[in-house]
Image (cartoon, helix red, strand yellow):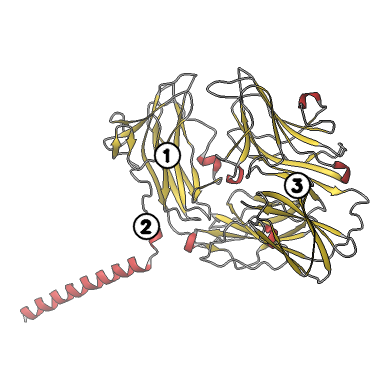
């Protein structure tokens, strides 16, 4: 009997052990892997080195030294020596899931008066830098001197489209001194789990037209579970449907096909859609969400907030984004060796832009002009200028000017009127100029100019992008225009062929113009649909002018992308 008891007891223990193993396996099988903390920074503790100046897995290590004293933990830390310009330590971290909450941290030691440091990082979508969480990841403040190691830490939600993170720290000279060293150790990025669906929708969602742009604003959702972000859906019809859990909606700011979308981080409480069709109603709905990737969880029950607005009845007079060069804009250098150039580092919307600086190892005196093509303001009223600008460093402020007596040669001999606009607050922060009223100027050859100046004592760096001048057709030109056919232009942007379809079978003629008014393809007649070969045209912005049987006209923008 005792033997049988021992057998039964052993059997019971074995069954209990097997049951425990099965339950453990079941837990690990059914729980999503993304809730388990995983360190994403490679060699974040800086214990591995390719050589004394290159920590393993760090793709950029400028003036870095392997150090054993001081260290925060382990055997090694990284020393970073200051110089006349900023220097970087950088790693592109992979495996980020959009919408997921992450803890980002590292330790630094700044115990000297001739060097200072700060984080200067970005979320990544492929190779594209995302601008989210600027205040936390690219702060304006530098480190303060302290005898002790200090911890940088931030809990942030990755943008919905993010798939990587550029972890970068920088060292700078301090008190006009160089050669000082700061130290880093224990870099870390870890996911902090999956969140449930947001408790509530946002409130006070509104849309306001500003020319051919529409600005949206709202009050953030409140409740036990806050959103990590929002998807704002747009359409030129009142037909928006709710997003589906588990399916990320990518950003789409081109509404030429009638629909669009924009992911916005929690806390921003505003966004905008630009370069829309004139005199057109647009509809918007906003949905909060948590997490990202396959775990994205939208608040798609209840009543979603919606808003609508109608763009102004305006036409594009001139537009330039510098993505494909200078277009019809002219650069004129009055003094100094530096001049306007095109750059693509940290651009607005991560695209090329116009840039001017007088600094080349030291400040130099310069005067450089960037001037638009001539515009016929006699054909328009209520003209408005807008553009984006960014700057950094100390120096004279960029000027925006307008003239109707410039002859295209020396700008210093013309009469220019200074324009007031919203300027960047520095640190290469892009800001919209606001709508600058330029309707006081008339003439058939009006010019807009950006004037950069610097001195031998100081030079700021100024950047300009997304320049747009719009206006309403002047009385007598378009006031009886009743062009009624609905047009579809596809693809737009186009590369070699653009296809046009009309909602009616009326005979329509279309002509293709440059943005300065030069006719490139004239009087192409069609009924119902047609195709236009644009393979011979360079990339840039063009205008399609449609005329129906009654003489009514309509202008649409075409972007050729090459």
Q: What percent of the width, then of the height, locates residue 213?
A: 73, 51
Residue for point 37% across, 68% down: 30
Residue placed under numbered mark 1 in the picture: 90
Residue for point 46% across, 19% down: 177
In this rendering, is residue 122 above or below 36?
A: above
> Could you say which is closer to the camera, residue 512 or residue 287?
512
- Mark 2 residue crowding within 10 angstroms, few (<14) / some (14–19) / many (20+): few
Q: CA distance from mark 2 to mark 3?
A: 55 Å
Mark 1 or mark 2: name the one nearer the start of the chain. 2
Q: Residue reaching furthest front?
A: 536
Q: CA distance from mark 1 to mark 2?
A: 26 Å
Q: What percent of the width, then of the height, locates residue 508?
A: 82, 64
SS class, disc 3: loop
In this rendering, is residue 66 above or below 128?
A: above
The label shown at residue 203 is: none
> Could you say which is closer to the camera, residue 166 or residue 376?
376
Q: Quadrant of residue 489?
A: bottom right
SS class, disc 1: strand
Q: Going by the image, does 240 lie left or right of 428?
A: right
Residue placed under numbered mark 3 in the picture: 515
Residue placed under numbered mark 2 in the picture: 36
Q: Quadrant of residue 412?
A: top right
Q: What percent of the width, then of the height, locates residue 319?
A: 73, 45
Q: Quadrant of residue 324?
A: top right
Mark 2 or mark 3: name the one nearer the start of the chain. 2
């Amino acid at each position: 009997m005792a033997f049988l008891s021992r057998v039964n007891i052993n059997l019971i223990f074995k069954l209990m052990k097997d049951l425990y193993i099965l339950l453990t396996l079941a837990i690990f099988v059914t729980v999503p892997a993304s809730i388990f903390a995983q360190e994403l920074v490679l060699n974040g503790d800086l214990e591995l080195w390719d050589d004394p100046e290159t920590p393993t897995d760090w793709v950029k290590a400028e003036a870095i030294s392997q150090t054993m004293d001081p260290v925060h933990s382990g055997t090694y830390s990284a020393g970073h020596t200051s110089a006349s310009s900023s220097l970087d330590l950088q790693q592109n971290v992979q495996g980020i899931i959009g919408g997921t909450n992450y803890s980002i941290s590292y330790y630094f030691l700044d115990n000297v008066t001739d060097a200072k440091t700060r984080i200067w990082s970005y979320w990544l979508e492929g190779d594209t830098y995302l601008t989210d969480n600027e205040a936390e990841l690219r702060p304006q403040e530098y480190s303060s001197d302290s005898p002790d190691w200090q911890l940088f830490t931030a809990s942030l939600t990755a943008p919905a489209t993010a798939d990587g993170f550029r972890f970068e720290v920088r060292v700078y000279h301090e008190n006009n001194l160089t050669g000082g060293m700061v130290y880093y150790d224990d870099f870390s990025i870890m996911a902090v789990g999956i969140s449930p669906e947001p408790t509530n929708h946002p409130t006070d969602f509104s849309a306001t037209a500003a020319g051919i742009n529409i600005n949206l604003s709202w009050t953030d959702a409140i409740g036990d579970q806050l959103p990590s972000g929002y998807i704002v859906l747009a359409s030129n019809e009142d037909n928006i449907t709710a997003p589906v859990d588990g399916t990320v909606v990518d950003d789409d700011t081109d509404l030429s096909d009638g629909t669009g979308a924009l992911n916005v981080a929690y806390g921003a409480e505003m966004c905008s859609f630009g370069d829309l069709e004139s005199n057109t109603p647009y509809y918007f709905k906003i949905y909060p969400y948590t997490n990202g990737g396959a775990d994205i969880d939208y608040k798609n029950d209840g009543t979603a907030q919606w808003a609508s607005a109608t763009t102004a009845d305006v036409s594009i007079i001139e537009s330039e984004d510098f993505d494909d060069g200078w277009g019809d804009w002219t650069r004129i250098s009055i003094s100094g060796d530096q001049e306007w150039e095109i750059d693509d580092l940290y651009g607005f919307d991560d695209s090329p832009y116009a840039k001017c600086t007088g600094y080349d190892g030291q400040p130099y005196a310069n005067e450089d002009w960037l001037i638009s093509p001539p515009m016929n303001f006699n054909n328009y009223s209520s003209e408005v200028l807008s553009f984006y600008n960014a700057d950094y460093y100390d120096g004279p402020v960029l000027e925006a000017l307008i003239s109707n007596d410039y002859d295209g040669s020396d700008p210093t001999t013309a009469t220019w009127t200074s324009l007031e606009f919203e300027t960047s607050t520095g640190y290469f922060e892009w800001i919209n100029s606001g709508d600058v009223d330029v309707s006081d100027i008339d003439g058939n050859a009006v010019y807009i100019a950006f004037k950069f100046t610097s001195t031998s004592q100081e030079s700021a760096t100024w950047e300009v992008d997304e320049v747009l001048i719009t206006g309403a057709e002047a009385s007598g030109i378009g006031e009886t225009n009743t062009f009624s056919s609905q047009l579809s232009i596809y693809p737009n942007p186009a590369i070699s062929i653009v296809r046009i379809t009309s909602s009616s079978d009326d005979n329509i003629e279309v002509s293709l113009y440059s943005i300065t008014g030069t006719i490139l393809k004239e009087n192409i007649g069609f009924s119902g649909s047609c195709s236009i070969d644009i393979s011979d045209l360079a990339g840039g912005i063009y205008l399609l002018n449609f005329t129906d049987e009654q003489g009514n006209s309509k202008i649409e923008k075409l972007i050729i992308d090459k």
